[in-house]
Image (cartoon, rainbow, N blue to C red):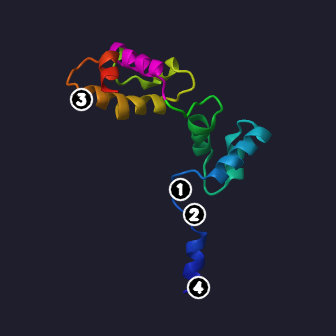
């Protein structure tokens, strides 16, 4: 019975969320070693790969990322961008927004703005429709 307990303790859990401790280690390692994600993954440990560390850095920890609320101006820019370019070019869309990641831009559209605007029942969207909803 004790062997099973020890084996369970040695298993690396299936990690999904990063902990604050891992973030702190990663930030400290980044200061010491730069963007060497192989070294960062060694220091973070817990089975985090260099690829996972790189992704976490560029999508969550990079100092230029703004995790805060979207401004009215940014919402208007996104509605206008989608009307011109469509909904499937997120690689290009996020470059229009300072301090927002591709994921932030796509999620803002698909989870917030599009559902609000679709409630008005129109194919093309205008920012005026959005301000009426708010």
Report the Cα–Cα distance between label 4 and label 3: 58 Å
Tags 1 and 2 touching, CB below 8 Å: yes
Query: Image point 57% across, 75% down: which residue?
Result: 7
> Element type at marker 2?
loop
If you read the primary sequence from the N terminus, does the residue marked by circle 4 or circle 3 appear first?
4
Residue 15 numbered mark, or none: 1
Q: Which residue is the site of mark 4?
A: 2
Report the Cα–Cα distance between label 3 and label 2: 44 Å
Alpha-carbon neighbours of circle 3 within 10 Å: few (<14), some, or many (≥20)? few
Query: Image point 68% across, 44% down: which residue?
Result: 38
Report the Cα–Cα distance between label 4 and label 2: 18 Å
Q: Quadrant of the N terminus?
A: bottom right
- Nearer the observer: mark 4 or 3; the answer is 3
| Residue at the outermost left position | 121
Report the Cα–Cα distance between label 1 and label 2: 8 Å
Task: Assess whether residue 72 is covered by the magenta stretch.
Answer: yes
Residue 117 vs residue 55, the one in the foreground? 117
Q: Which residue is the site of mark 3?
A: 119
If you read the primary sequence from the N terminus, does the residue marked by circle 4 or circle 2 appear first?
4
Task: List x then y, in percent, for residue 121.
Answer: 20, 25
Q: Which residue is the site of mark 2?
A: 12
- Residue 27, relative to residue 120: is it above or below? below
Report the Cα–Cα distance between label 1 and label 3: 37 Å
Alpha-carbon neighbours of circle 4 within 10 Å: few (<14), some, or many (≥20)? few
Task: List x then y, in percent, for residue 79.
Answer: 37, 19
Magenta stretch: give its range: 70-84
| Residue at the outermost right position | 32
């Amino acid at each position: 019975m004790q062997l099973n307990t020890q084996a369970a303790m040695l298993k690396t859990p299936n990690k999904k969320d990063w902990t604050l401790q891992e973030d702190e280690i990663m930030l400290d390692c980044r200061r010491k070693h730069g963007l060497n994600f192989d070294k960062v993954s060694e220091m973070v440990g817990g089975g985090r790969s260099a690829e996972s560390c790189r992704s976490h850095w560029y999508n969550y920890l990079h100092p230029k990322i703004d995790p805060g609320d979207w401004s009215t101006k940014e919402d208007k820019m996104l509605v206008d961008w989608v009307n011109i370019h469509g909904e499937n070019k997120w690689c290009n869309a996020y470059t229009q927004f300072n301090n927002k990641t591709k994921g932030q831009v796509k999620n803002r559209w698909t989870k917030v703005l599009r559902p609000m605007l679709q409630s008005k029942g129109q194919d093309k969207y205008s920012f005026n429709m959005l301000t009426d909803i708010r």
